[in-house]
Amino acid sequence: MSIEVNNLTKIYKLKRRQKKTAVDNISFSIPAGEIVGFIGPNGAGKSTTIKMMTGILIPDRGSISIDGLTFRKNRKQIMMKTGVVFGQKSVLCWDIPVIDSLKLFKDMYRVPDDVFKENMDSFSNILGLDEFIRQPPRLLSLGQRMKADLAASLIYDPDILFLDEPTIGIDVLSKERIRQFIKKINEERHTTVILTTHDVSDIETLCEKMIIIDKGSLIYDETLSDLKNIYRTTDLEEIIKKIYLAGEEKNEKIC
Amino acid sequence: MYLLKMYRHFVIIYMKGKLAYHFSLIFELIANTIQIGVYFAGFMVIFHNFSNIAGWTQNEVLFMFTTSWLTYSLSCFFFWSPMKDMGELIRTGKFDLYLTRPIGPMLYMVLQQFQYTFIPRLALSVFFWIYSMSKLSIEWTESHLVFYAVSMVSSFVIFSAITVFTGTICFWTVKSEEIVSLLTNNNYGLKNYTDYPITIYNKGIRFLLTFVIPYAFTGYYPVGHLLGKIPAHSGFACLSPVIALAAGAAAFLFWRTGLKHYNSAGA
Amino acid sequence: MRKYADLAIIGTKEHTAYLNSVWANFLAKIVYLYMQFSLWNALFSSNAGRNIPLSHDETIRYIIAATLISTFMECDVTMWINGQIQSGDVANQLIRPIDYRIMIFAKHIGTSAVKLLIYTLPFGILTALFYHDDLFCKEQLLYGILSIILAYMIQFLYSLIIGLMAFWLIVTWPLNMLLAAVYKLLSGSWIPAAMFPKLLTTINMFLPFRAIYAIPVTIITTPMSPGSIRENLCFQLIWLAVLFLLSEVTWITGKNKLIVQGG
C-alpha cells in the first residue's frame, strides 16, 4: 500500500491560549513496498506525524490517504492492513505464553489457518521464536520481546508496518536479526515499512529513503545516495549531525 | 459472531494469565467473598435490632438491594476494569495501541478482560436475592415479570453508563480515581445510599439519586413499585427504560466526545 | 529527636501533596456521615417503642464521634510498609541509623497531625453547626482522650503487623481488603458494638478490633460506671501489650527472612 500525505498540520493547544505547531504543512508520499527512515531530533514532530499516520491523532489540516483510503471513512479497513510496533510498549499479554497472544491476533485479524502456519514457520526460522514462544513476555529479554512483538504485528500480513524505535536497548546480535527480518519481510511481501529510530545503522542497512523532520517541518525527503552526494560524504551519522546542527543555527538566527 | 469468538478467546487468555498466579487468584476471590459477606452480616445486625426502615421490612430491603447489586456485578464484569484503568492507560500511552486495532477502543477494552473479582458479589447477591424472594409473597403475573425483567436490563444499562462516564473523564483530567471512589467505594460511596429506601434522605439527595446520578432506578423505584411500596411514585418505576436509554445515550456521546478530544489533543 | 520530627514533616507533606484528593477525602466523610445519620434516624423513627440497646440520641452521638475519630485514625501505614517491602526499599531503610518501626511511627504521627488539622477540625466545626446538643460526655472526657490515644497506638501496631505480612505474601491487597472488611464491622466504626447479637459480641470479646473504635467512642459519648471504664481501659492496655509483642516477633522473623534470603 502506498501512503500519500498532503499539507499535514497539527497544532496543540497549550494553556492560556498558547498554541504550538507540532507539525507544519508537511507533504510527502511513500510508494508501496518501500522502507522509509523517519528521523529528526527529539521533539521535532516526528512522533506526532507517526501518530497521525496510524490514525491515533486527527490532523488539524491536510490529509492522509492510504491507497486512496482515509481514516475518516475506512478506519477498520486500514487497521486490518496496518501493523504497529512501538519499541517501548508491548502489544503482548504480559502473563501468558507468546504463542497465545499470536493466536489471539490470528483471530482478531481473521488470518486463515494455513497462512498462520506458514507465517509461523517462516518467522521461527529467522527470529528463532521457538526458543521462547511458550514463555510469557515477563520472562523474556528485551530482544526476545521485540522479536515476539514483531511476529505479533506481522502474523496477519499487514501491507504497512510502522516501527517506532524497534532496536532501542537491544543487543547487537538481536538488532542484526531484527533488521534481517524486516528486510526479508519487505522483499518477500512488499510491505511498506515506516521506521523511526535514533540508530543510524538501522537506517543504513534498511532504508532506501529518508524523511527528516525538524521543528515540525519537512527538511529532507531524499534517497540515501542523494543525501550522500549532497553532503559529499558516505558517513550517514555525519550528515544527520550536520542537518540537525543547521536546524539549531537557523533557530538561533531567528531569535 | 466474530465478536463473540474474540470475546471467548480474550477471556480464556485473560484467565490463563491470572491463573499463572493461582494462589493470588483464590485469595482474591476469598477476600472478595468475605468483604461482601461482612456487608450482608452488618445488614443482618442492623435488622437484628430493628424490624423495618421507612416501612420496608428486612426482606423487602434485601430484595431491593440485591436486585440492584446483581445487575451492578454483571455490569462490572464488562465495564469496571477498563474504566478504572483508563487513567493508567492514557498515562502510559497504552491507549494508543488500542486505537490501532480493527476493533474500536471501547469494545476492545471490554472484550479483552473479564472482571472475575465480582463473582463473589454476584453469587452472594443471587443467594440473598432468592432468599428474600422466597420470604416475600410477590405475585409473579406476566406483566410483573416483564416489568421486572425490563427494569433489570435498564439497571444494567444505568450502572454501565455511570461507569463509562467516570472513565471518560480521564480523557481530560487523567486522574479520576477520586470521582470513581466517591461514587462506588464500598465504605462511603454514593452508590451505598441506594441500599436503603431513598425516602430516608432529604429532598436534595433524592433528586440527585433520581435525576442526576440515577442510582434510584436500579432498585428503589422498580422494586418499590413491584412491592406496592411507592404508590405516590409509581409512575417513576415505568421510567426506568427511559432513564436507562437517556443515560446510555449520554454516556455514549460523552465517550465519543472524549475520544475525539484525545484524537485531537493527545495526552 | 530532630530526625523523627523531620520524618513527621515528610509525612505531612506527602499527605497534602494532592489537594484534589484532600477535597475528595473530606467530601467522602461528609457523604458517609450523612448516610449514617439518615439511616439511623430512619431506623429509630420507624421503630418507635422497640427495645434497642442504645437510645436514638446515643446512637447518633456514637456515629458522629466514630466518624470524627476516623478522620485521623485511619492510616496508610500498611500500604507504606507493603510498598517498601515489595519494592525492596526496606533493605535501604535497614541501613539507616533509625529503627524502621519508629521511623514509620514518626511519619504516621506527622500524617495524623495534618489530618487533625485539615479534616478533624473543620469536620468537627461542621458537625457542631448541625448538631446542637452536647456530643461528648464531659465527665468522662479525660478518660475518653486517654482511650483514644490507646486506640491510636493499637491501630498503629495492628497496621504495622499487617503491613509486615508483605514479607510472606506476593500480593497483599486481598489480605488488606479482607481485614478491612472485618475491621469495619467488628471495630464498631460502622454499627455501634452495643447492637451486636450475642454471638458476635462473644467473638469480639477475644479480638482487638473493638479497642480501636467501640471502646473510645463509647467512653466519650455514653455515661458509664467508673468500674466499666477501668475495665475497658484495661482491655485496651492488654491488647496494646499483646500487639506490641506480636509486632516485635513479626518484625524480627521478617527481617531475618530478608537477610537470609535476600528478599
Image (spheres, grey):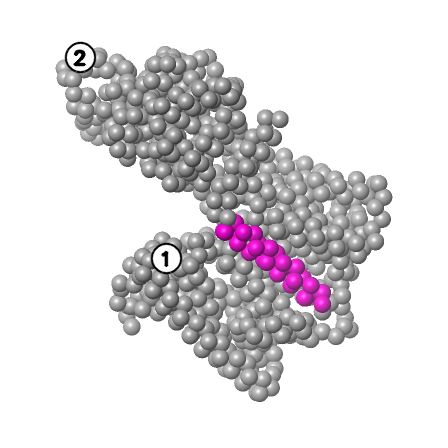
**Does residue A254 appear left or right of residue B250 in this picture?**
left
Point out residue C242 in the picture as x, y percentages from the top left corner.
46, 76
Q: Which residue is mark 1?
A: C84
In the rendered image, which quarter is residue A36 located in?
top left
Residue A96 is situated, as x and y percent measured from the top left of the image, at 46, 38
Question: In what quadrant of the picture does the N terminus of chain C appear?
Answer: bottom left
Vertical side of B263 occupied by A230: above or below: above
User: Residue at the spot x=49%, y=41% of the render?
Assistant: B17
Quarter occupied by the C terminus of chain C? bottom left
Q: Give the chain letter at badge 2.
A: A
Q: Position of residue C208 (x, y in %)?
A: 53, 72
Q: Mark number for residue A215?
A: none
- Going by the numbered disc 1, the residue's amino acid type is Gln
- Dot 1, how many residues are within 10 Å of its Cα: few (below 14), some (14-19), or many (20+)? some
- Looking at the picture, does residue C209 appear above or below residue A43? below
Which label sits in the foreground, 2 or 1?
Answer: 1
Q: CA distance from mark 2 to mark 1?
A: 58 Å
Label 2 sits on a secondary structure element that is helix
> From this viewpoint, is residue C112 visible?
no
Pointer 2 with pointer 1, Cβ within 8 A: no
Q: Chain of mark 1?
A: C
Mark 1: secondary structure: helix
Task: Using a 10 Å C-alpha cutoff, classify the residue at mark 2 as few (fewer than 14 neighbours), some (14 to 19) or many (20 or more).
Answer: few
- Inspect the magenta stretch and tell me whether residue B35 lies in it: yes
Q: Is residue B131 left or right of residue C22?
A: right
Which stretch is magenta? Answer: B23-48
- Is residue A168 shown above or below C32? above
Q: In the rendered picture of this protein, how many numbered marks are placed on residues?
A: 2
Residue in the picture at 55% in, 72% down = C207
Viewer-closest of C260 and C240: C260
Q: In the rendered structure, find residue A229 and report the number of the disc placed on it.
A: 2
